[in-house]
Amino acid sequence: MKENVFVIGLGLIGGSLALNIKKTHHHHLDVIGFDINQEQLELAKTLGVIDQAASSLQQGAEQADYIVIAIPVAQAAEVLKQLEHFTLKQSVIVTDVGSTKEEVVKTAEALIAKGIEFIGGHPMAGSHKSGVAASKAHLFENAMYVLTPSSSTSSEALDSLKELLSGTKAKIIVMSPKEHDKLAGVISHFPHIIAASLVHQAEYYQQDNQLVSQLAAGGFRDITRIASSSPAMWRDILLHNQDALLSMFDHWLEEMNDVRNMIERKDANDIYTYFSQAKQFRDQLPVRTKGAIPSFYDLYVDVPDYPGIISEVTGYLAEDEISITNIRILETREDIYGVLRLSFQTEEDRKRARACLHQHQYQTFIS
């Protein structure tokens, strides 16, 4: 008799996990889905992302052997509170996919006290697309997937969850909820704050000079890309990771004051060292491993200036079923070659696109 995996929330992450689990364990697991958005739920069933759709949260939860809560952190906490009042299987394993872990694990303590296994989870992968239609079974391949068991989590439950996630081909790391929130703050949460602050600064200076927004269309737009993320999601993440972020603010303000002092005293050596050390650390970061913030894989294409050139390039890629995440013209003036920047979700898509365009005599380069 098959066991049931109940996925709550069928957006990009929930849908991709459901699709992966269904593909990996279809012989002995059924994937049941639930989403408050009825259209998403019906689409998930139509696309084969799930095997069945639950009629209610309670109906799906009470027949589940695994429950995956794949919704934003604030809503996940509410769902955990609701699960307390359901008649769950005593052997059920509950996990989530939220970007913060300490508060979620605290909320789950009432469930844990009833003998239910809860293991926090955070797959550090994503896409620039959203919704169940963007689900990909291979979304988590080569990504870091953090699990944060509680002090009472059994080794059998942890191993069972790892087995459920084995088909993702993610690199599973186990750590405490507190350690996770500190690391996530460093490599994801705080950078989002900085990106938003840079945008606010540009908006402030635009009051004096309207050219700011035009000049900001280049590299500034790239380094502040993550400021376009969901405001509601980041409000909840910041509130759930308050302690770690407040500590980082103290260190950041100290560092900015140090840099300010370097500039004020025109200390060329210290300024050079500051940027040199940053470059050295940044250049050593893994290239192929997915991180907490989705990457762009950019390909630059030399294109002549004539009508229809963009549709020609994208048409060739469409024929080979290569999906483009983003497209931008970096430079085009009459009678000279321009540069088309195409962005892809994976390095493999970029390789395929490059080979495709070379076949059609286009010159391309990576950087």
Image (cartoon, rainbow, N blue to C red):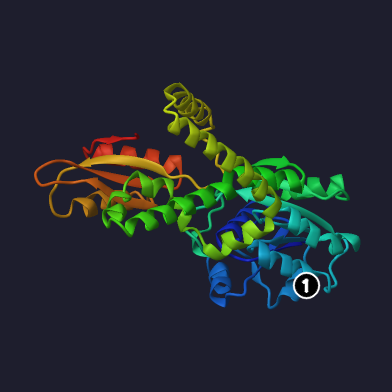
> Quick one: quadrant of the C terminus?
top left
Judged from this view, the residue extending furthest toward the left is 335
Percent from the top left, x then y, of residue 299?
A: 34, 40
Residue 217 in picture, x, y percent from top left: 31, 51
Q: Residue at x 86, y 64 (%)?
A: 110
Q: Residue furthest right?
A: 114
Q: Nearer the viewer, residue 61 or 218?
A: 218
Viewer-nearest residue: 51 or 276: 276
Instruction: Determine crowd level at label 1: few under 14, some 14-19, many 20+ residues with C-alpha closer than 10 A.
Output: few
- The number of numbered discs placed on residues in the rendered structure image is 1
Q: Quadrant of residue 54?
A: bottom right
The structure residue drawn at horizontal position 56% and vertical position 52%, both measured from the top left corner, is 137
User: Could you tell me if residue 36 is visible in this image?
Assistant: yes
Which type of secondary structure does the marked residue at label 1 adopt? helix
Amino acid type for the residue under numbered disc 1: Gln
State left or right for residue 12 relative to residue 272.
Answer: right
Q: Residue furthest front?
A: 265
Q: Identify which residue is drawn at 12% across, 50% down.
A: 306
Residue named by callout 1: 82
Residue 17 position, x and y percent, is 62, 55
Which one is in front, 82 or 208? 208
Q: 176 or 290: nearer the eye?
A: 176
Relative placement, left or right, of 46 versus 123 is left
Quadrant containing the N terminus is bottom right
The residue drawn where x is 53% and y is 75% is: 39
Residue 197 drawn above or below residue 42:
above
Would you say residue 169 is visible in this rendering? no
**Vertical placement of residue 353 versus 58, above or below:** above
